[in-house]
């Protein structure tokens, strides 16, 4: 599996302008021409690097662009499990997110319509926990907090380990362990952790529910991410190899052993495209890459950045001296781009659980993620 994303291959319908079109517009400019032209006509560098730098600068703005949003793969809470590997439908690891923007969780096993839901507050980081101390209340607002982590930094179970001493804090599978699909039940079942590290050091994620065999699943040393591990003897479960550089989610509070199953629908911002090429590729093929997901209607903002960066790469001192002024003007244009999209009323909000003088809902009103633990006084 690839360990990097090429967003310019997404085929975004709002992004059709190619690098070739950008080159054709900026190359005739007098001060820029010497940077991009050679005796043979033109060269890929530094143009490709300039385009990558410009796109990274646009994406570095602390603003959630709508055109850059991505829906993360759906995942569901599991017994005593705080960290969750994100997998695409084909079993490959998920990479296409730079930071989390917002999200909700849905009480998926509820047989009522509409299904109960709550907010998920997305942040930068949070610590590992066991679920036994953070008993704040039921269906708080937000119901959960979530952050991303590289798969390599999340915790994994050890197949056949005892209840103590493993990174999973005791929720490990072993011979005969049963993984029941919680979506087929009306409540969360008591499943072991759904991600483990095998004897060869591979990170594995549960891919098919079933029963564990008498031996542990195992993949070859340094197995290719996305491949299925060899099942244990007599096992009906399947495990897939996880890419350590992929993305996972950490939650608080930690779901209980039994109770409500929550489905998470998180939205994030994609990483900036990295325009690249191999020496075996034809120049025309490289320049066919589009600016996706950057919309065509904002092309002037990208083109202005390319022109400014060309001044930076010039070997002529007088031309290079123009970089600072033009770069500052381009930075101001990015502020304008942000303001252009920031005119709508902000609907995201926090709802207090109770008023300043107390009162409000009772802890017994809903069966939230803490159930069936007891709840202390607040």
Image (tube, rainbow, N blue to C red):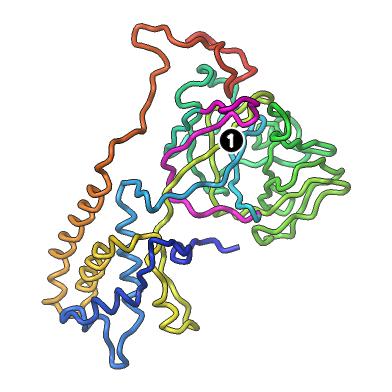
- Name the residue located 42 percent from the left edge and 37 percent from the top edge: 123
Helix, strand or loop: magenta stretch = loop
Q: Which residue is mark 1?
A: 263
Location of residue 176 by image quarter: top right
371 shown above or below 295? above
Residue toward you, 120 or 17 = 17
Instruction: Residue at 53%, 21% (x, y): give it.
Output: 134
Q: Is residue 263 magenta?
A: no
Indicate yes or no whether the magenta region holds residue 103.
yes
Viewed as shown, does residue 212 lie left or right of 38? right
Crowding around mark 1 (Cα neighbors within 10 Å: few <14, some 14 to 19, many 20+) is some
Q: Does residue 310 appear to the left or right of 318 in the view shown?
A: right
Depth check: 252 or 270 in front?
A: 270
SS of the residue under disc 1: strand
Rendered residue at 44%/36% (across/down) = 122
Residue at the far bottom: name it: 39
Q: Position of residue 173 (x, y in %)?
A: 76, 37
Q: What is the number of callouts on the image?
A: 1
Residue 151 x/y as whole percent: 57, 48
In the image, taking residue 219 as reference, residue 155 lies left or right, namely left
Q: Residue furthest front?
A: 113
Where residue 210 sits in the image (x, y, percent)?
80, 41
Name the one closer to the observer, 235 or 334.
334
The residues colored magenta run 91-117
Report whether 236 appears left or right of 250. right
Location of residue 241 (image quadrant): bottom right
The residue sitting at 24% across, 62% down in the picture is 301
The percent coordinates of residue 247 (x first, y second) are: 53, 49
Name the quadrant of the N terminus. bottom right
């Amino acid at each position: 599996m690839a360990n990097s994303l090429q967003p310019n291959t997404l085929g975004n319908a709002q992004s059709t302008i190619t690098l070739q079109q950008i080159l054709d517009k900026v190359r005739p400019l007098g001060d820029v021409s010497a940077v991009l032209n050679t005796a043979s006509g033109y060269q890929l560098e530094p143009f490709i690097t300039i385009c990558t730098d410009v796109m990274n600068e646009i994406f570095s703005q602390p603003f959630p662009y709508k055109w850059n949003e991505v829906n993360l793969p759906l995942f569901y809470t599991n017994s005593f499990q705080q960290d969750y590997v994100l997998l695409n439908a084909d079993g490959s690891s998920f990479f296409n997110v730079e930071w989390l923007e917002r999200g909700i969780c849905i009480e998926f096993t509820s047989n009522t319509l509409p299904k109960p839901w709550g907010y998920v507050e997305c942040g930068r980081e949070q610590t590992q926990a066991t679920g036994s101390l953070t008993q704040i209340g039921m269906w708080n607002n937000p119901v959960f907090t979530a952050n991303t982590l590289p798969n390599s930094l999340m915790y994994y179970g050890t197949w056949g380990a005892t209840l103590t001493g493993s990174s999973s804090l005791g929720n490990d599978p072993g011979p005969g362990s049963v993984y029941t699909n919680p979506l087929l039940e009306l409540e969360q079942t008591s499943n072991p952790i759904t991600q483990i590290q095998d004897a060869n050091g591979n990170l594995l994620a549960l891919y098919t529910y079933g029963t564990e065999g008498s031996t542990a699943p195992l993949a070859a040393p340094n197995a290719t991410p996305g491949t299925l591990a060899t099942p244990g003897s007599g096992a009906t479960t399947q495990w897939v190899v996880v890419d350590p550089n992929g993305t996972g989610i950490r939650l608080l509070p930690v779901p209980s052993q039994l109770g409500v199953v929550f489905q998470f629908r998180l939205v994030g911002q994609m990483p900036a495209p990295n325009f690249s090429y191999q020496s075996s590729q034809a120049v025309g093929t490289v320049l066919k890459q589009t600016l996706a997901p950057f919309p065509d209607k904002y092309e002037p903002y990208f083109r202005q950045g390319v022109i400014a960066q060309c001044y930076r790469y010039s070997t002529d001192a007088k031309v290079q001296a123009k970089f600072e002024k033009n770069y500052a003007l381009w930075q101001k244009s990015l502020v304008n781009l942000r303001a252009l999209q920031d005119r709508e009323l902000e609907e995201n909000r926090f709802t207090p659980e109770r008023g300043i003088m107390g009162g409000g809902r009772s802890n017994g009103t809903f069966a939230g993620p803490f159930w069936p633990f007891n709840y202390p006084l607040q």
